[in-house]
Amino acid sequence: EDAPPCAIKKIRKMSPANVGAVAREVSLMRTLRGGEGLVQLLDVFEDDAAIYLALEYIPGGDLCKAISKRKSYTESHVKHMLQQLVQALAFVHEHRVIHLDLKPDNIMCVNSGEEWDHFSLKITDFGVSKLLQPGETLTRLVGTPLFSAPEVHRGEPYSFPADVWSLGAILHVLLVGQGPYDDCRDKQVLYDRMRAGSILFSSPTWALLSDQAREVVQVLCHEDPDQRIPRLDQLLDHPWLAFVSEEVEHSNGHHGQATLQQDQRTITASKDASQELSHDETADDVDRIMLGSTVRDIAVYAERQTRIKGLVRAVLHGSTEARASEDSEAPPLSDGGGGGG
């Protein structure tokens, strides 16, 4: 029986710190194994030059691409997506893991989004995530500026509510087709608003949406982290999410492609204002994700690349050694994007 395809995230070994960061990512993904709504880690391999994470292959691509393909989302569609994200992130937080880089690019679509009865989302990329001890807070500047909570921008101690704010920013994009700060073009004003968490709800699309939808964004994106919802699963009891209608609602009418272009202009304008924010520690060392290969394919591939006899997995995978077949021909790995990680 043929093995199912997977997505391969190849991280070059640039330094001991780099390898340690990948080991932490692997450990966190093992902690979250089996969580619904999370891209799963299937296996880990390493050779003398790189580490290979074999991830669950998600053929639909990321949510950012899905937004660009669709002309509009209804509130029912958005509710359906938010319910899944709330349940997935609640599972992550229950295991005391904080994601730290939630954004549409790190949410995978199980299909293209055309069949809403079967449309599901999965959170991916735990490269900067961290396991928090009870009462522990962070001050590290990390994440994607336009989706980072104000307390992160201010350098204040933060915890799980920072992820909640990011989820609210994603909801803002899904509802009105633009991020919380897309109405801002001045760099200094943008910087000040990101630090304050000031969302103006200035898009005219808000007039077409229910008051309850706006209220959920306000609950998730409250500027005071202590005033955000204390437990994510409690959000499912909110009247807006308590019942997801199957009926086709009036479209809110925003255009996905125009949204992405506008987001890109804002991101470019905000780089200087938020340059002190760091990003994925391993980002410069990650090769393009290779899609359509199986776990065995990558084992053979890595075996052929290494100068060390055998494929060592002792540190990252827990087994002593795994060897690829000497007489197996390693199939080429196709480059691609959107498989997770």
Image: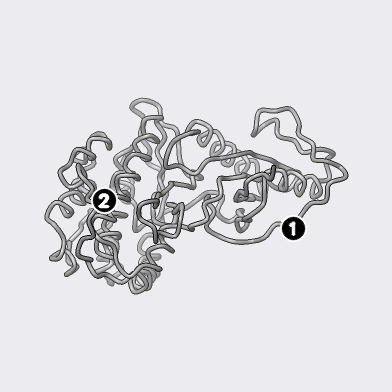
Lower sequence index among marks 1 and 2 = 2
Specify the amino acid type for callout 1: Pro
Residue at image location 39% in from the left, 56% down from the top: 104
Query: Which of the pair 87/313 is nearer the observer?
Result: 87
Residues at circles 1 and 2 in contact by the CB criterion of under 8 Å: no
User: How many numbered tags mark residues here?
Assistant: 2
Q: Position of residue 228 (x, y in %)?
A: 21, 41
Residue at the image point whose x is 75% and y is 47% from the top? 302
Q: Secondary structure at mark 2?
A: helix
Residue 6 in the image, given as x and y percentages of width and height: 61, 48
Horizontal side, residue 310 vs residue 62: left or right: right
Q: Please determine whether, in this image, residue 220 is positioned above or below residue 173.
A: above
Q: Secondary structure at mark 1?
A: loop
Residue drawn at point x = 60 percent, y = 61 percent: 336
Identity of the amino acid at label 2? Lys
Residue 91 lies left or right of residue 60; in this view the side is: left
Query: What residue does disc 2 label?
Result: 79
| 329 or 268, nearer to the observer | 329
Local packing at callout 2 (Cα closer than 10 Å; few below 14, some 14-19, many 20+) is many
Where, by quadrant of the figure, is residue 269 drawn? bottom left
In the rendered image, which residue does mark 1 sit on? 332
| Residue furthest to the top | 134
Q: Quadrant of the N terminus?
A: top right
Residue 26 or 151: which is nearer the viewer?
Answer: 26
Q: Is residue 186 above or below residue 215?
A: below
Q: Is residue 316 in view? A: yes
Instruction: Give coordinates of residue 129: x percent, y percent.
Output: 46, 41
